[in-house]
Every structure is written in C-alpha cells, then in structure tokens.
Image: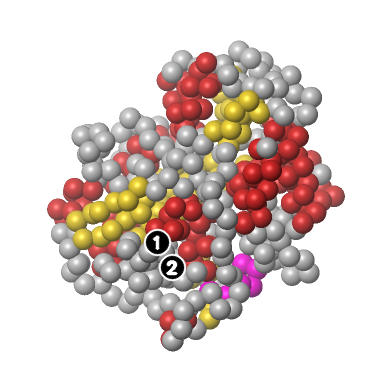
C-alpha cells in the first residue's frame, strides 16, 4: 500500500522574521549570521552535546505515512520496534499542511517535526527548532551527500535537521491523448494548448516556483537564477504566466488520490505529478508516462527537526536516528513513495528496483531538481541590490491566480 503527503502550505500567510530580533532573549537569543542564505540572522540556540537514556516518550508532528504503527495497515509498522528498542513511546500528530506544522511546533508541545523545505526556514528563523548535533545521530553518516547541509536544512554550514527523503515534481501525460511525448514544462503553459481544460497543476503557492523555473529558460532576459528567489519583476512574470495557465487548468490537485482518478478517467491528460502517483496511475491501468523536463523541476526534501525547547530531546534524537536507519528508512520510503535518505536503505526495500525507480542514487538526476525552499525578502540567490518577494506575498498571489 502506498501513502503520500496531503496538501502543502496552502492556507496561512508567512510570518517570518528573518532579520535581527526574531529570537527570544538571554544567551539563547544571541544572533548568528546566516551567510550564504541572503545574509539573514537566526537565533543562536545551543547545540545538544550528549544524550541520556531517554525520557520515555516523544511527541512528533509528521506527514501522514511517516510514523506508521500498524493502525492504518497492520503490516506497516516501524514505530513499535522503535518503542521496544528505546523505551520511548511515540505520540504522533499528523499534519495536513506545512503551515499547520509551523503552528503546532510553536505551541511547544512537540519535540520533533518532519518539515518540508517550504517550512524549515520559517522554523529556523523563528527559533522554533534547534541546530542538530549530527554526531549524536550515527546513521547520519550514511545519508546521501546530496541531502546534507542544504539551504533548506542548514544555516551557515550548521545542520538544523536530519534528511528524511526526497522526490521530484515530474511532468505526466496520458499516452493515448498526448501522442507526442513532451520534454518541456512549456506543454502545461502553452496558451494555445490543445488540451485546454484537461491540464492539471499542483495546488499550492509554492507552485509559483514551477512557473519561475520554466521562465528561467523561456525568458532568459528576466535573469532568474533561483525559482525561490524572485524580485518583483520576476515574480510578476511568473504570476502572469500562471494566470494565463489558469484558463487551461481543469483541476488543481493537492491530494494524490484525486490526481490518480483524474488521469484514470481522462479528466486530466497532462500536468505536474510525483513518481508515486505515476506508479499508482499505471497500477490503475491508466496509460501514463512521466519525464523530468529539460528545464529541470522543483521537488521536495523533508527534514526531521528538533524543537528548541523540546521536553523529550533524548527520545527525539533517538527517533531521528531510527527513522533514517537503513531498514526503517527503506520501509517509510517505500510506503510513502520517495527516494530514501540513507544509502544503505536501497538494499532493504521489498521492491529491489525501488531505488532505481525513484532515482535514489542518481545525483545527476537530483542535480536538476530545485528543492522547495521558503522564499524570503533576502534573495536566496545571493543578490543584495534588490529585495525578493517573500512567501506571504506568494500566498496572497496564489489566491488571485486561482480566481
């Protein structure tokens, strides 16, 4: 049985203070410069230096499918083995959006969260999560290098979490309706598309980055370097493109089952997707194929992060080490539908071709993927002569795009 994420970051506006003053007070609120990420400052929070035996429980905020205990499928359970080995009882709150995760973590009731890149910088900047001492997570050594110390999970070379997995947003089409295989995102943005009304797009403000990525190649005069670092002119161009596309879109999707059914029925014949959706669609006998277009793609990489004021930090660290251990990481990756983070997990999947299908070891493939990162006013592409459009404005624009 496959499972995957629900809608991401579609509701609340971004409240992110990435300048001085976004932390608390005292020693833990001293500022550390985030060089290389637009120069923003984050609260300086002490890094944990050692672990104890554990506090007896851990409270998690997680995507559906990330902390399975057999209650959804009795054959899918990596929580109870963890509890037995560590003595840490797992209490999980499943979140439906990145904004919900942010809200839950700010209550102080949770110890760790499986944050996506459109939430992780917000958690870091607000002082909600702490830097992670990777030496206390032995299985971190086997994480693919391509996932370590990235803009969405680190600041100034300091890790703020443990990578969980990754995936690309792909282009899918029905081969019986779209007879010429597309190789560009232009297929979903063509104002004169013959598939008007049967094109589908991802329902989230972060989808603006998909338009920006296409424009990076299609309109080089805009000077787009990073689809998450858009100045006003670049942002306006992406929004304009998406408003044109709105007239072509038959349905925006955020839940994977909805897109599977749309492609199966033929209501959708072309649009953005995930590899797991393509697999499920084929299992439902839908004649579909997918590609990573020539412009590259956007994508997602989730990170387990520890609350700055975690009440059960020892168990939180133990959980992070467990969930990226080879066997558990293989289980969750295969159940959820994503490339695992731990290289050794590929030898433990039930489907021996799983890592090949999800390109787990193909760094050349993932070098073409621009992983979700929270857009902020300080341009993430390094520019200092202009301001970029932050995520709150992306959220506002998305409402106008959909009409």
Q: Is residue 318 visible?
A: no
Q: Position of residue 45 (x, y in %)?
A: 43, 77
Q: Position of residue 141 (x, y in %)?
A: 37, 60
Q: Earlier in the sequence, mark 2 or mark 1?
A: 1
Residue at (34% x, 41% y) in the render: 65
Q: Residues within 10 Å of mark 2 (few under 14, many from 20)?
A: many
User: Is 32 drawn above or below residue 91 in the view shown?
Assistant: below
Residue at (62% x, 50% y) in the render: 395
Residue at (28% x, 69% y) in the render: 311
Q: Is residue 92 left or right of residue 5?
A: left
The magenta span reads 37-42
Q: Position of residue 31 (x, y in %)?
A: 53, 81
Q: Position of residue 249 (x, y in %)?
A: 66, 28
Magenta span dominant secondary structure? loop
Q: Do the CB atoms of the residues marked 2 and 1 lie less than 8 Å apart? A: yes
**Disc 1: which residue:** 105
- Quadrant of the image occupied by residue 192: top right
Tell me if residue 39 is in the magenta stretch: yes
**Disc 2: which residue:** 128
Nearer the observer, 21 or 85: 21
User: Is 271 drawn above or below residue 308 in the view shown?
Assistant: above
Q: Is residue 345 left or right of residue 236?
A: left
Mark sitting on residue 16: none
Q: Is residue 41 left or right of residue 241?
A: left
């Amino acid at each position: 049985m496959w499972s995957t994420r629900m809608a991401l970051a579609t509701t609340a506006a971004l409240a992110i203070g990435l300048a001085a003053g976004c932390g608390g007070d005292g020693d833990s609120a001293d500022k550390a410069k985030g060089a290389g990420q637009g120069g923003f400052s984050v609260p300086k929070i002490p890094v944990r230096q050692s672990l104890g035996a554990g506090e007896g429980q851990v409270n998690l905020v997680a995507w559906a499918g990330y902390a399975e205990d057999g209650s959804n499928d009795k054959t899918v359970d990596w929580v109870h083995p963890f509890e037995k080995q560590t003595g840490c009882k797992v209490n999980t709150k499943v979140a439906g959006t990145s904004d919900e995760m942010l809200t839950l973590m700010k209550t102080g009731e949770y110890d760790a969260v499986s944050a996506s890149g459109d939430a992780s910088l917000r958690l870091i900047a607000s002082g909600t999560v702490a830097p992670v001492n990777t030496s206390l997570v032995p299985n971190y050594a086997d994480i693919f290098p391509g996932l370590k110390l990235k803009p969405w999970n680190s600041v100034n070379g300091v890790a703020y979490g443990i990578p969980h997995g990754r995936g690309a947003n792909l282009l899918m089409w029905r081969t019986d309706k779209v007879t010429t295989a597309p190789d560009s995102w232009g297929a979903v943005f063509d104002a004169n598309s013959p598939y008007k009304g049967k094109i589908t797009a991802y329902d989230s403000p972060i989808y603006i980055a998909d338009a920006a990525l296409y424009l990076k190649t299609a309109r080089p005069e805009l000077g787009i370097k990073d689809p998450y670092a858009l100045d006003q002119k670049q942002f306006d161009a992406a929004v304009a493109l998406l408003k044109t596309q709105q007239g072509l879109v038959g349905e925006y999707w955020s839940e994977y089952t909805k897109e599977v059914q749309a492609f199966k029925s033929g209501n959708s014949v072309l649009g953005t997707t995930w590899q797991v959706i393509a697999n499920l669609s084929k299992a439902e006998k839908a004649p579909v194929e997918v590609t990573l277009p020539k412009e590259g793609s956007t994508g997602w990489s989730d990170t387990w992060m520890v609350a700055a004021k975690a009440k059960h930090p020892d168990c939180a660290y133990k959980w992070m080490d467990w969930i990226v251990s080879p066997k558990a990481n293989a289980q969750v990756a295969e159940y959820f539908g994503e490339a695992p983070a731990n290289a050794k997990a590929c030898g433990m999947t039930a489907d021996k071709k799983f890592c090949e299908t999800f390109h787990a070891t193909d760094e050349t493939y993932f070098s073409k993927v621009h992983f979700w990162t929270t857009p902020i006013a300080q341009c993430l592409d390094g520019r200092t002569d202009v301001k970029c459009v932050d995520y709150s404005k992306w959220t506002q624009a998305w409402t106008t795009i959909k009409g």
